Image (cartoon, helix red, strand yellow):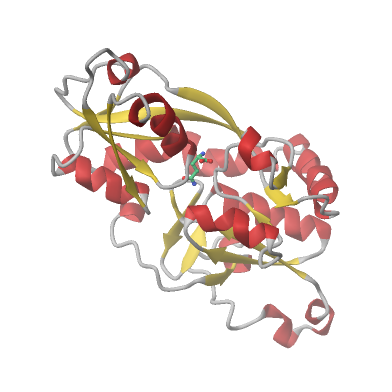
Amino acid sequence: MKKFLKGILVTTMVVAMTAALAGCGGADSAAQPEAASDSESAQKETLIMATNAEFPPYEFHEGQGIVGIDAEIAAAIAEKLGYGFEIEDMAFDSIIPAVTSGKASFGMAGMTVTEDRLESVDFSDSYATGVQVVIVKEGSEITSVDDLFAEGANHTVGVQTGTTGDIYASGDIEKKDLGTIDRYNKGADAVQSLVTGKIDCVIIDREPAKEFVAANEGLKILDTEYAVEDYAICFAKDSELTEKVNGALKELIADGTVQAIVDKYINAE
Ligand code: GLN
């Protein structure tokens, strides 16, 4: 998956996933609605997924398109429910506002279910477990997560803005004067700062962490986990979609589709 991390291009903001689902790699731009040649789908309502496509293997740019575990599960859900499907790429902390304002039908971005978020959105059933881990340089004096909270600790910690890594680090480290938090729009940028020695570690979800470590020399993931979380899809409160999506998700889990998608991006490597 290394190649996906190099040459990331933010060119297509809205992408039809049909091509990616069909395994074509470069998805067609949504500027060419599939409906054009198909009067039936012309009437189809389209689900818009808000995401932050900087989070491999869940969502990332590949060629002109956005692919990944979330992108494919969401496309499969939309297909099962008879909707068209588009992805809109945005900053992670814009996803919930896009959903609550109705600009997007749902948000899916390796998003952790938290009490705070539940105050503004509803979540689907969980479809994956996420683990917050810490990336350090090989040979770092930080050898376990606890080192970040030790008395007198004073590390500069990189996080992605608005993520649970940011929320935890803000409470556990910044508020307790045990270090400084550097916030980045992309996890990859935080990792670059670590590579150049500007920061001491990065707190981020494990699967993207694995990808970033594989793409950069001299980094490793600490063995100890920071937190274990549930990923789910978020919806506007009381949206009728939540139940429908849960139904489709259940079926896609039961028939092995979700596992096959996960295997394609994670286990197969
Ligand atoms: N799981 C983390 C969160 O929900 C990070 C998600 C992400 O960066 N896409 O905050």
Residue 213 horizontal/vertical position (percent): 28, 37
Residue 51: image quadrant is: bottom right
22 is higher (above) or lower (below) than 164: below
- From what the image shows, is residue 42 above or below residue 90? below
Q: Position of residue 80 (x, y in %)?
A: 79, 56
142 left or right of 226? left
* In the displayed structure image, the side of residue 265 where residue 211 appears, left or right: left
Instruction: Pick the residue in front: 162 or 71.
Output: 162
Closest to the observer, 166 or 145: 166
For the C terminus, give its image quadrant: top left
- Is residue 90 visible in the rendered structure shown here? yes
Res 269 visible: no
Name which residue lies at 80% across and 41% down: 251
Number of residue marks: 0
Q: Residue at x 44, y 71 (%)?
A: 64
Locate residue 173 relative to residue 248 in the image: left or right: left
Position of residue 80 in the picture relative to residue 225 (left or right): right
Question: Residue 111's spot in the image, x, y percent?
Answer: 57, 43
| Residue at 48%, 23% in the rendered image | 227
Measured along the vertical axis of the image, is residue 127 above or below residue 154? below
**Residue at left 42%, top 38%?**
166
Q: How far across and how far down the image is residue 147, in percent?
A: 27, 16
In which quadrant of the rendered view does residue 47 lie?
Answer: bottom right
Corner quadrant of residue 99:
bottom right
Q: In this view, does 226 lie above or below 59?
A: above
